[in-house]
């Protein structure tokens, strides 16, 4: 596992491991409370490292909160180390709470598929393992149908050279990750993984989705 690799070489490049993942600063969650009367919806996306997923979706207009966590497995309230050991069945997830009047589920799906490689099984770049699988856990029939339709259209379009392996599954369970994982990129921009992996992805993301970003971002 890329993030868990602990060698002198990677340390010299500031590429961090599981053992090095304590934040340099106290987390400050990027959470906005919905105004009174606003109805929110929730989605659960897995697209590799939840630090990356969190950083993308936090910046979208209409998104109130993004939380990193684990879902889909059989171990209750797993630790990060247990998930890394690949014995819990859990996937790294982002729990996204949003205002459907400002940003639609379809728009979130677009961001989901454009911010990772949905054709690599249990892998995103050098992050390898079942916890990194591409997955959408749907909460209702509408989410299921839209996700399946979008996936089928993308496969038919030939947007990727290889078939999409993203799974679309009914929501099973979800457990928030440890506090030090929350708001990780924003609180640790100088960490190696953030600098060399997340920052380049985020730069591309902000160019592609410029019109959908929060003004203060």
Image (cartoon, helix red, strand yellow):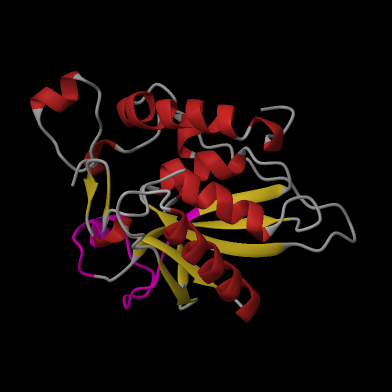
Q: Nearer the viewer, residue 127 or 174?
A: 127
Q: Is 91 left, or right, of 176 in this rendering?
A: left
The percent coordinates of residue 208 (x first, y second) are 57, 32
Residue 10: in sight, yes or no?
yes
Residue 180: in sight, yes or no?
no
Q: In this view, does 127 lie above or below 186?
A: below
Q: Which of the image's four quarters has the C terminus?
A: top right
The percent coordinates of residue 181 (x first, y second) are 42, 45
Point 63% across, 40% down: residue: 30
The percent coordinates of residue 78 (x first, y second) are 33, 66
Q: Is 54 left, or right, of 181 in this rendering?
A: right
Q: Nearer the viewer, residue 40 or 108?
A: 108
Q: Is residue 149 above or below residue 188?
A: below
Q: In this view, does 184 lie above or below 9?
A: below
Residue at the limit of the structure toward the front, as seen here: 157
Point 55% across, 47% down: residue: 111
Segment tinted magenta in the rendering: 68-87
Q: Is residue 76 magenta?
A: yes
Q: Is residue 186 magenta?
A: no
Q: In this view, does 119 lie above or below 147?
A: above
């Amino acid at each position: 596992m890329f993030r868990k690799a602990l060698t002198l070489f990677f340390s010299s490049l500031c590429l961090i491991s599981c053992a090095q993942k304590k934040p340099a600063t106290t987390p400050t969650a990027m959470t906005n409370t919905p105004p009174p009367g606003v109805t929110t919806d929730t989605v659960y996306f897995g697209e590799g490292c939840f630090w990356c997923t969190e950083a993308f979706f936090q910046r979208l207009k209409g998104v109130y909160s993004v939380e990193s966590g684990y879902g889909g497995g059989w171990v209750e309230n797993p630790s990060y180390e247990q998930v890394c050991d690949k014995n819990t069945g859990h996937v790294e997830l982002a729990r996204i709470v949003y205002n459907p009047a400002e940003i639609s589920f379809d728009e979130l799906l677009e961001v989901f598929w454009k911010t990772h490689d949905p054709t690599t099984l249990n892998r995103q770049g050098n992050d390898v393992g079942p916890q990194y699988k591409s997955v959408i856990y749907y909460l209702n029939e509408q989410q299921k149908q839209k996700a399946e339709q979008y996936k089928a259209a993308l496969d038919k379009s030939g947007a990727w050279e290889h078939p999409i392996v993203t799974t679309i599954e009914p929501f099973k369970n979800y457990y928030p990750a440890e506090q030090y994982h929350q708001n990780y990129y924003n609180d640790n921009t100088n960490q190696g993984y953030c600098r060399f992996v997340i920052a380049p992805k985020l730069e591309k993301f902000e160019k592609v989705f410029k019109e959908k970003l929060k003004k203060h971002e």
